[in-house]
Amino acid sequence: MSEQEKLDLRAKINKGLKQSYENLLRHKAALGLDIITADENGQPVAIAASELIKKRAN
């Protein structure tokens, strides 16, 4: 596999992961659910999916 093929594959995988995350956020927001993420200290934090979508839009 050439370097360009590796870069193309990596870009395709990253695009798919981003789209999957966006779909997860939209789905959870529609159901009124939270997303569990980590704060700057690595501690788990629950954030409403709808709030996270608003923050990402800014």
Image (cartoon, rainbow, N blue to C red):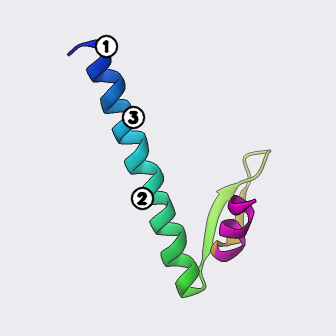
Residue 30 magenta: no
User: What percent of the width, then of the height, locates residue 14?
Assistant: 43, 41
Q: Which residues are magenta?
A: 50-58
Displayed quadrant of residue 34: bottom right
- The residue that disc 3 covers is 11
- The residue that disc 2 covers is 20
User: What percent of the width, then of the height, locates residue 3?
Assistant: 31, 13
Displayed quadrant of residue 50: bottom right
Q: Callout 3: few (<14), some (14-19), or many (20+) C-alpha neighbours within 10 Å?
A: few
Residue type highlighted by circle 3: Ala
Question: Label 3 vs label 1: CA separation?
Answer: 12 Å
Q: Earlier in the sequence, mark 3 or mark 1?
A: 1
Depth check, front residue: 35 or 50:
50
For the point 37% across and 31% down, which residue is it?
Answer: 10
User: What percent of the width, then of the height, locates residue 21?
Assistant: 49, 59
Left or right: 24 in relation to 48: left
